[in-house]
Amino acid sequence: MRRLKLVRNIGLGIENLLLHKLRTFLTMLGVVFGVGSVVAMLSVGEGASKEALEQIRKVGSNNIIISSIKSVQEVSQATIHSHMSIYGLTYEDQFRISETFGHVKQVVPVKLVRKDARLGERNLELRIVGTTPAWFELLRRPVVAGRVLRAEDARDLAGVVVLTDFGARKLLAAENTIGQAVRIGGNFYEIIGIVKSEGGMAGSIQMPDEEIDAYIPIEVAKERYGDIILRITAGSNERELVELHKMVIEVDHIDNVESTAKGIEAMLKRFHKKDDYRISVPLALLQQAKATKRTFNIVLGSIAAISLLVGGIGIMNIMLASVTERTREIGIRRAIGAKRRQIISQFLIETVVLSTVGGFVGIGLGLFIPWLITKFAGMPTVVTADSVFLSVGISISVGIVFGLYPAVRAANVDPIIALRHE
Amino acid sequence: MINQADKNEDLVIRLEDVHKIYQMGDQQVNALAGVSTTFSAGGFCAIMGPSGSGKSTMLNLLGCLDRATRGRYILEGTDVSTLDDDALSELRLRHLGFIFQSFNLIPQLTVQRNIELPLYYLGWDSESSAERAVELADKVGLAERLNHRPTELSGGQMQRVAIARALANDPRILLADEPTGNLDTATGEQILQLLAELNEQGKTIIMVTHEPDIAMLARTRLHMRDGLIETIEED
């Protein structure tokens, strides 16, 4: 019975709002844009953070990645005269890290060599990644065909290679790949598998794998290519001795990543005279991404809050005008026997209906804008159910907050004066 | 506190030394300066007097739209002077019907909706309200105008709608403030005729007017001056 009465009152409110269609529409616009921007902005923030999370997940949030880099003094020396640069991570480092830190589950060493690959007519420069089978555990990528490296491959010093889908496509086109032999540099390798590759930069994170990777057992890489790389550039022969180009370290638990990374850094500092390595912690990037999202939400949220405030003030303004305009009506209703709270609820229902309908239209707008952003700006957006519920809540609250004052003013009109009001 | 007189069913209203004082800037205006009187059930009383005599204040007070500054007002056994705003609204809703000089219909509502208005606040459902509205519109001769808006009606028709609305809650007392003031003589007479009929059917009618011709229709005439009752004439 009470519910029925509320439904009827809402119906009456809608009827009254429909008497001034244009006015109602214009008043509603404030909330429409306010709510629309809330939903749209949250979706942009959510999309950005989801993309970051996705990238970090691909790098592995439990992983620590150490890369060898040529230190600054090494670069300047090398340009002066022919010189052998010795830098980067060593087998010793790998051993120390895996033995020293209790939280380190495994260390995956990586040797990188760039070589041209040839298969029939086709040609492609590949990045040979000499590594262990654990690489594929730490950086999980879908296996498109065949298999990944196994322990036996290293033991047998087997000339086998796992290509990326990109590399396989470039070299082999549509032919059946698995089992074929490919010449990389001066050596032949049997293709045993194809994995998908994430490839290069993804947003702000450098992925450890690239599209042009060719994975071979690290023992094979050591044997066939050694540790010294000769790089012939214009004017100088540059030789580099780098034992390991990368290490991917898996930590047993996400809570231990930070402390382990700190420990490794301290250790490397002690054993390396030059600053020839870089530690990157995807988890740190995750925290950074979270912080960015927070900032994003605060900034965008404030803008949205301001537009909602403006929308709410717009509603209040119109409702105050409406109260003045309908003073006589209020007087009549009061004379007939309407209580103050009935007048309050009459006006409040009107504002809440106004703001709620505006809110729903705004949600529609808030779904449409992210779609446009994704379609035309290529930015990822995610509209969460939470943001939609939040918006409905906000629009109802806007109606109550900004409708209350005009409604109370309406209820406090003196019926005697109101009845004389023209 | 109920005294002997209130138990008398013939008395619907009793005023005891009622004062109404308005503060107008520095000045105090004694709109009512100690009025004591009674109105009996089923009566038809005209309150007369020049403007500023306090007759409008009197009607507002009787209609529970206003409260006395001092004195007691007993309406159907209830001491109104001590009631709060909600209780006064409740009294208006259940016991009183208003008829105004300028009709005071709500312009955006149809005739039917205007008549139904008190029923809405009484919490009637829409079916019974509609039934009642049709019945009342028929009674005042406007059965065909139910879906019209007040602006599409003549003055006389509007006042009939207002009367139908005043009757919706089936009050014992009808309060009329110059009900014919905005009507031409012929229409005014029809409205007065309608009021007289309602009185015969048992409604107590209290009407403010300054026209002696109209006041002659009432059985009691109460002359006011300077916030006091000067004379009471009875037929």
Image (tube, coloured by chain):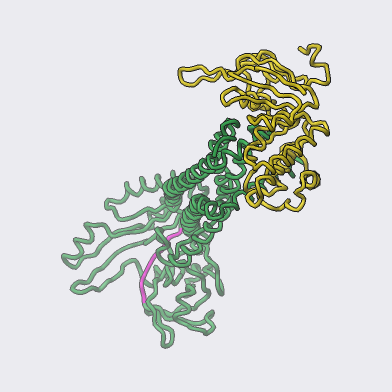
Along the line of sight, which residue is nearer the eye, A359 or A372?
A: A359
Along the line of sight, which residue is nearer the eye, A347 or B12?
A: B12
Along the line of sight, which residue is nearer the eye, A202 or A266?
A: A202
The residue that appears at 37% across and 80% down in the rendered structure is A186
Position of A174 compared to A7: left or right? Answer: left
Residue B195 x/y as whole percent: 75, 36
Which chain did the renderer colour green?
Answer: A
Q: Main secondary structure of the magenta part?
A: strand
The residue that appears at 48% across and 46% down in the rendered structure is A314
Above-or-below relation of A118 to B193: below
- The quadrant holding residue A337 is top right
Along the line of sight, which residue is nearer the eye, A86 or A409?
A: A409
Give the residues drawn in magenta, as a range.
A108-115
- The quadrant holding residue B30 is top right
Residue A325 x/y as whole percent: 54, 42
Quadrant housing the N terminus of chain A: top right
Q: Is residue A56 visible?
A: no
Q: Colour of chain B?
A: yellow
Q: Does B75 appear in magenta? A: no
Residue A227 x/y as whole percent: 34, 66
Above-or-below relation of A386 to B174: below
